[in-house]
Image: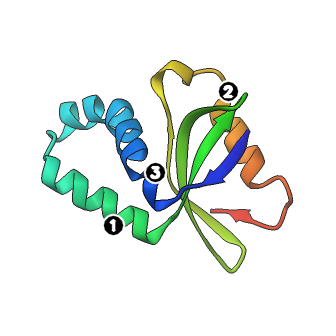
Amino acid sequence: MKLIPIQKKDKKDLWRIYIQSMKAHIEKIWGWDLTWQQKDFDKNLAIYTTCFLLSSKKTVGYIQYQVKERKCYVNMIIIEPPYQSKGLGVEVFNSLFSDNTLIPI
């Protein structure tokens, strides 16, 4: 699993992944408020390090995290529906913490 930092041009692709992976769940629980979702999405892009998740050279999702004093807080990990339940989430965490320089919180 590779974590590839996003660039500004990637926002549209991230938003597509977010909607495909999260909209149905959010809509069912709270209702989908597009304006609020877009503002929260933009806020999180500004705050967190965001990386695409690549498995076998395919983008399978993304992760958002923040590091402070070696402590790593994961805000969001999204695995696109076709790739879920295949152990990729574990691979993401193994990649993020493989060098033992970060402490998960």
Q: Is residue 14 above or below residue 47?
A: above
Say which residue appears at 33% left-offset and 66% top-offset. Answer: 43
Say which residue appears at 49% left-offset and 66% top-offset. Answer: 48
Marked residue nearer the N-terminal end (3 or 2): 3
The image's mark for residue 87 is 2
Marks 1/3 in contact by CB < 8 Å: the verdict is: no
Marked residue nearer the N-terminal end (1 or 3): 3
Marked residue nearer the N-terminal end (2 or 1): 1
Percent x, y of residue 88: 66, 31
Residue that carries the numbered disc 1 in the rendered image: 43
Q: Amino acid at mark 3?
A: Asp
Q: Of 22 and 60, which appears nearest the observer? A: 60
**Label 1 element class:** helix
- Sort mark 3 into few (<14), some (14-19) or many (20+) by Cα contacts within 10 Å: few
**Label 2 element class:** loop
Residue that carries the numbered disc 3 in the rendered image: 10
Say which residue appears at 68% left-offset and 42% top-offset. Answer: 92
Left or right: where does residue 98 sit relative to residue 54? Answer: right
Q: CA distance from mark 3 to mark 2?
A: 25 Å
